[in-house]
Amino acid sequence: MPRPKIPVEDRLEIQELFAYYAWGLNTGDAEEVLACFTEDCSFEHLPQGIFRGHDQLRVLLNHLWYDKPGWFIGRQHLATHFVMTPLSEQEMHVKAYSSILQHNLDYRSNFVFGLASWDNVCTKASGEWLFKSVRIVKWMGQDVPWVGEDRARIQAPTGSLL
């Protein structure tokens, strides 16, 4: 099946939307984050749950930034490998990989905090691309994207080897 041809301007505007979101999120700028979302957005961020609309997004941001001092500051969210599929003239399904780098202020060290994949719908109903829905799938245990055969997974022996 041929891949959809996305106009370059739309592709770049959507990628820039991810960048504005990441800059706002990583620097504690709630207004910048909210400017990336429609008023009636949904945001699935487990384990916290699904947040709907700007008021609930503020609750999530306050939790992430301030409920665990020192835990979030110094993060850098990186979105890559965008796969875009038009849903209509005004909506785009966007998949991407995400990695989170962390700079620990106390220890002055850097590490990979986490990996995830994104499953989003963006809309251009307002004249600019915004997130309508965001679903983040954190890679924990077996929760990684894989459509190949299960035999690729590690099948560790069970029971006693004696």
Image (cartoon, helix red, strand yellow):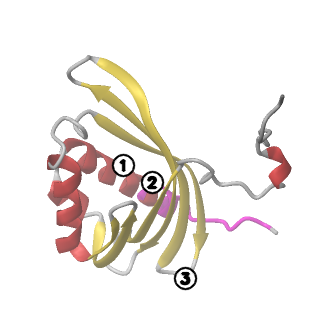
Inspect the image, locate mark 2, and give the three-letter code of the amino acid beneath it.
Gln
Give the SS element for disc 1.
helix
- Per the rendering, the mark at residue 40 is none
Image vertical order of residue 101 relative to residue 127, above or below: above
Residue 52 rendering spot, x and y as whole percentages: 29, 77
Residue 73: image quadrant is top left
Query: Residue tagged by mark 2?
Result: 15
Residue 137 rendering spot, x and y as whole percentages: 50, 58
Q: Dot 1 surroundings within 10 Å: few (below 14), some, or many (20 or more)? A: some
Residue 156: image quadrant is top right
Asked whether residue 127 is in view, the answer is no
Disc 2, disc 3: CB below 8 Å?
Answer: no
Residue 8 colored magenta?
yes
Residue found 48% across the figure and 64% down from its top: 10
Q: Is residue 72 left or right of residue 19?
A: left
Residue found 68% across the figure and 68% down from its top: 4
Per the rendered image, the range of residues in magenta is 2-13
Disc 2, disc 1: CB below 8 Å?
Answer: yes
Who comes first in sequence, dot 2 or dot 3?
2
Query: Residue tagged by mark 3?
Result: 88
Count of all numbered marks drawn on residues in the image? 3
Q: Is residue 112 left or right of residue 149?
A: left
Image vertical order of residue 131 relative to residue 112, above or below: below
Q: Dot 3 surroundings within 10 Å: few (below 14), some, or many (20 or more)? A: few
Who comes first in sequence, dot 3 or dot 1?
1
Query: Residue tagged by mark 1?
Result: 19
